[in-house]
Image (cartoon, rainbow, N blue to C red):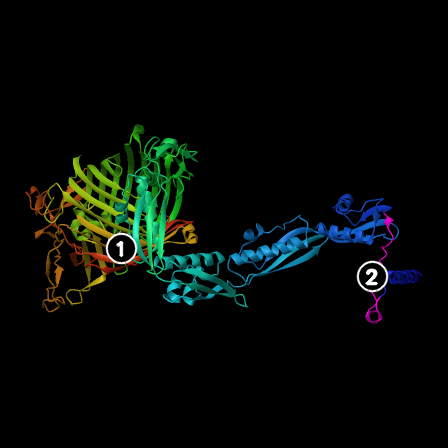
């Protein structure tokens, strides 16, 4: 019936329109189409909500559910309003499903199913990124409400994390494990995929330089087998932008001022394993420098003179780097004269026809600047005066950029603050005033070390030390240390006051006790054999005063008692040192000696940092005089100089050191050097890499005989030889070392690699007298033997009767101070003489001293000024186990007798 009414209404409406319209021609009436009439939509009947309830909610209050809808009791509702209520409920992210019942009666029931609670979030398949790296980035967490929107967002976050790592093929599949009590475990199944590499870098538009030349300038490198361990082959969007800048910088330094990168596109291969990067460039023409001028609005500066100091000249190829350097140098020059805020503006005159680039550096007018105040902040432990006394400018002084930079270097050298400390320059209360802001960030200056390690020099090492470099925040140094190894033991206490009574005078002292066991090498296997023991006890007092900003004078006084001993069971015969067993050179060294010495050093130091310098110089010229009492008299001079250059991130250093010691006392006997063995210089590991410890310089090698003389089978073998370093009275050592720039990742690991070359020598010792007389060797038939070079083959003639310089030795019996019977060596057949060949006293008959030592050959070599040369690579690493240094060095030049060593390393000890 309703459809009939609607049709009737439509017809009546059409009749009415036809009667009202004007009459139309017959032709038009026949062609006219009947007019379309829109249907009439009748809305559903509107009812009011009689009641409103919620069913299915567990954690969420019913009122909270209803608050997300516009449904209210007593208000009308329609199908559209009910549908909108369901949309609003699902948009709340609180519900997994929502339905409405009771539409016909008006008793509306909202049936809901709540989203589950997350029980745990599980990551599976992630190896390259650990859980802690991912968990802190995602939003889902236990005891939170699970929503699919949050899951999708976390999937996107995880994928983005892997993209930052260069893994564009990574995918994440979320899984839900339903549990009881409406709980759910969310599992992210991660497929990390391979790291996306840069397969190819294409460059289009380059005519002057090849693709390979330009690729060398980029940070990003093409993936190749020889770069398997390089991180530069991974795709990085930030690195892509940096490479464009690198290309621009390269061309600008080569004169192409119009160069530009038109486009840079990185395309991911379909398998998402590799990228192909394509650059489209436009090189443009090459320019030369035109007229280079300096126009200064500051009356104190002569523009023509300043222009002559600039690095570029007319006719040179244009180089944007030289322009930047010129701006810096002009700013620094102005700063030296107190103009802190000088504006240097380069004005370019480009001639596209002549292809020249003229530059006029304009120095804007500026006021001479004075330091209004120095602000020091951030120091919670260090006293202000410790920082201020390193400042080279004070309040009221004329600003000087050089002195500000020097102040910054001196504060950095303290080692109390962060490495990259800078003094900020801020505008003062007036244009001619400047505020210097030293915002420091303190770091720990106390060191407590308990370590065990292994060194190729000292084998196993145990160390304990405590050191405070900023004691009580006053810049004082207090230290105590103890160490134990296979060859040395030491205890040391020290204290230094850098500013005595707040005056620029440093005073410090050290007390020490050191027990050092020297060793030599035995046999072809280079086994170590204990030699002599040196026990040193004493102290040193040091004072220093500055002469100028860079020059300092330092004085010292040392009092030291040395006791040198040999193992009596090994090297003694009848209670005395036996030259046939130890060597005459060692028997001459034993005894107690007191050294009282005074020294002075002149020091020049312009390093930007004493901890890790990259520019500047340090030279130390010192002299020591021993003889203010005591038993030892000598004068010793030393020189030590280092120079550092920063070459665009590369640090080149050159060093030269040397020394000479001269005795001020007579030799105690023929063939004995007046400079005792413990006062001489030694050269080798660790300061001369490529050579073993004490491996350079004068030495004696004693090779014993094996076999039987009578049968002619007696022979010298390296398996039965000892190598004793004797030290020298003069030495020199030069070094050239280069440290490459490192990425932030390697720097954070504490790695510092370097390549180096060293040259040096140790010499000047008085030739020691031989231990035994020598005679020409013969075969079984008595025929003389000769060496390969035709020289006589000499062997020690060790007769059954012991001799000393040709005189027979005898054993004299006596009673020791303790009352025990003892014997001693003498040249007297009867009686005793304290000196060999002296007057014999006493009538007791002595017995001949018999040799028990096998014949041996004693050779002296290595005493030459001729250089030794080594080259190698090394790396310092502040490892979790302590500082470590490894050096691989090859000795290219060496002298006879030198001991070389390819690899040296130290762990757990300072190097």
- Residue 506's x, y, as percent? 28, 33
The answer to whether the residue labelled 1 contacts the one labelled 2, judged by CB atoms less than 8 Å apart, is no
How far from the left and from the top, in percent, is residue 899? Answer: 24, 57
Which one is nearer the viewer's eye here, 476 or 418?
418
* Outermost top residue: 501
Q: Is residue 555 left or right of residue 107?
A: left
Q: Earlier in the sequence, mark 1 or mark 2?
A: 2
* Left or right: 190 as drawn, with respect to 896: right
**Quadrant, the N terminus:** bottom right
Residue 284 in the image, given as x and y percentages of width and height: 39, 62
Name the residue at 42% across, 56% down. Answer: 245
Q: How dense is the environment of label 1, judged by Cα within 10 Å: few (below 14), some, or many (20 and up)?
A: many
* 381 over 661 or under it: above or below: above
Q: Nearer the viewer, residue 280 or 381?
A: 280
Q: Is residue 656 above or below residue 280?
A: above
SS of the residue under disc 2: loop
> Residue 25 in magenta?
yes
Q: Nearer the viewer, residue 584 or 572?
A: 584
The CA span between labels 1 and 2 is: 106 Å
Task: Report the residue marked by disc 1.
Answer: 692
Q: Which quadrant holds residue 606?
A: top left
Estimate how packed mark 2 is, as few (under 14), some (14 to 19) or many (20 or more) residues with alpha carbons within 10 Å. few
Q: Which residue is mark 2?
A: 38
The residue closer to the viewer here, 871 or 736, is 736
Residue span colored magenta: 24-48
Q: Is residue 610 visible?
A: no
768 to 276, vertically: above or below? above
């Amino acid at each position: 019936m309703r459809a009939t009414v609607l049709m009737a209404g439509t017809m009546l409406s059409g009749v009415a329109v036809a009667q009202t319209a004007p009459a139309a021609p017959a032709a038009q009436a026949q062609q006219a189409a009947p007019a379309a009439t829109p249907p009439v939509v009748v809305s559903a009947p509107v009812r009011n909500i009689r009641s409103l309830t919620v069913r299915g909610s567990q954690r969420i209050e019913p009122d909270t559910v209803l608050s997300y809808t516009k449904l209210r009791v007593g208000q009308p509702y329609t199908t559209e309003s009910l549908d909108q209520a369901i949309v609003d409920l699902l948009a709340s992210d609180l519900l997994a499903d929502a339905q409405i019942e009771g539409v016909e009666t008006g008793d509306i029931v909202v049936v809901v199913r709540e989203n589950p609670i997350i029980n745990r979030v599980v990551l599976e398949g992630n190896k390259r990124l650990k859980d802690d790296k991912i968990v802190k980035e995602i939003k889902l967490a236990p005891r939170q409400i699970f929503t699919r929107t949050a899951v999708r967002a976390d999937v996107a976050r995880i994928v983005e994390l892997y993209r930052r790592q260069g893994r564009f093929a990574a995918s994440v599949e979320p899984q839900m494990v339903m549990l009881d009590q409406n709980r759910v475990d969310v599992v992210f199944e991660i497929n990390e995929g391979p790291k996306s590499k840069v397969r190819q870098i294409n460059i289009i538009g380059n005519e002057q330089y090849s693709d390979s030349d330009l690729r060398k300038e980029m940070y990003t490198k093409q993936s190749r087998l020889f770069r398997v361990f390089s991180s530069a082959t991974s795709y990085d969007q930030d690195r892509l932008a940096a490479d464009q800048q690198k290309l621009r910088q390269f061309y600008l330094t080569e004169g192409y001022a119009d160069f530009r990168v038109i486009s840079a596109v990185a395309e991911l291969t379909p398998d998402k394993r590799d990228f192909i990067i394509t650059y489209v460039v436009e090189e443009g023409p090459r320019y030369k420098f035109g007229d280079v001028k300096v126009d200064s609005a500051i009356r104190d500066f002569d523009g023509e003179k300043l222009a002559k100091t600039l690095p570029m000249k007319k006719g040179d190829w244009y180089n944007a780097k030289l322009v930047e350097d010129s701006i810096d140098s002009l700013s620094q020059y102005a700063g030296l004269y107190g103009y802190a805020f000088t504006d240097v503006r380069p004005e370019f005159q480009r001639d596209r026809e002549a292809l020249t680039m003229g530059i006029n550096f304009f120095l804007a007018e500026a006021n001479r600047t004075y330091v209004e105040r120095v602000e020091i902040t951030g120091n919670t432990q260090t006293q202000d005066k410790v920082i201020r006394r390193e400042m080279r400018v004070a309040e009221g002084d004329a600003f000087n950029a050089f002195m500000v930079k020097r102040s910054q270097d001196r504060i950095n050298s303290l080692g109390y603050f962060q490495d990259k400390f800078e003094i900020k320059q801020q505008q003062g209360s007036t244009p001619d005033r400047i505020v210097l802001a030293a915002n420091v960030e303190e770091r720990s200056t106390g060191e407590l070390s308990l370590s065990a390690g292994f060194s190729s020099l000292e084998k196993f090492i145990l160390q304990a030390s405590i050191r405070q470099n900023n004691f009580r925040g006053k810049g004082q140094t207090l230290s105590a240390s103890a160490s134990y190894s296979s060859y040395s033991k030491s205890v040391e206490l020290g204290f230094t006051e850098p500013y005595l009574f707040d005056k620029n005078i440093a005073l410090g002292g050290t007390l020490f006790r050191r027990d050092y066991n020297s060793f030599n090498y035995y046999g072809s296997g280079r086994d170590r054999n204990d030699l002599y023991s040196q026990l040193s006890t004493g102290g040193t007092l040091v004072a220093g005063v500055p002469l100028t900003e860079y020059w300092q004078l330092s004085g010292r006084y040392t009092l030291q008692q040395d006791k040198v001993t040999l193992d009596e069971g090994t090297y003694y015969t009848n209670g005395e040192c036996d030259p046939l067993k130890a060597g005459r050179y060692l028997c001459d060294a034993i005894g107690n000696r007191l050294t009282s010495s005074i020294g002075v050093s002149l020091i020049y130091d312009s390093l930007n940092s004493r901890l890790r310098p990259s520019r500047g110089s340090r030279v130390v010229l010192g002299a020591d005089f021993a003889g203010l009492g005591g038993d030892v008299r000598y004068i010793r001079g030393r020189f030590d100089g280092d120079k550092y250059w920063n070459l665009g991130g590369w640090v080149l250093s050159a060093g030269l050191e040397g020394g000479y010691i001269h005795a001020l006392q007579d030799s105690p006997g023929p063939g004995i050097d007046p400079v005792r063995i413990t006062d001489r210089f030694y050269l080798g590991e660790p300061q001369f890499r490529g050579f073993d410890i004490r491996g350079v310089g004068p030495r004696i090698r004693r090779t014993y005989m094996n076999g039987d003389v009578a049968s002619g089978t007696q022979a010298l073998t390296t398996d039965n030889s000892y190598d004793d370093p004797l030290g020298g009275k003069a030495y020199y050592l030069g070094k050239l070392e280069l440290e490459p720039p490192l990425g932030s990742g390697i720097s954070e690991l504490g790695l510092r690699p370097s390549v180096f070359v060293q040259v040096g020598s140790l010499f000047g010792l008085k030739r020691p007298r031989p231990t035994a007389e020598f005679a020409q060797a013969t075969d079984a038939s008595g025929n003389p033997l000769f060496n390969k070079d035709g020289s006589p083959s000499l062997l020690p003639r060790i007769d059954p009767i012991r001799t000393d310089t040709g005189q027979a030795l005898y054993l004299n019996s006596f009673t020791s101070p303790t009352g025990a019977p003892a014997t001693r060596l003498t040249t007297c057949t009867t009686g005793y003489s304290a000196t060999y060949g002296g007057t014999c006293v006493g009538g007791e008959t002595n017995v001949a001293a018999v040799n028990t030592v096998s014949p041996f050959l004693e050779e002296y070599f290595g005493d030459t000024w001729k250089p030794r040369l080594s080259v190698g690579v090394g790396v310092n690493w502040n490892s979790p186990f302590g500082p470590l240094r490894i050096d691989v060095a090859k000795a290219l030049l060496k002298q006879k007798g030198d001991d070389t060593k390819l690899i040296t390393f130290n762990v757990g000890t300072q190097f």
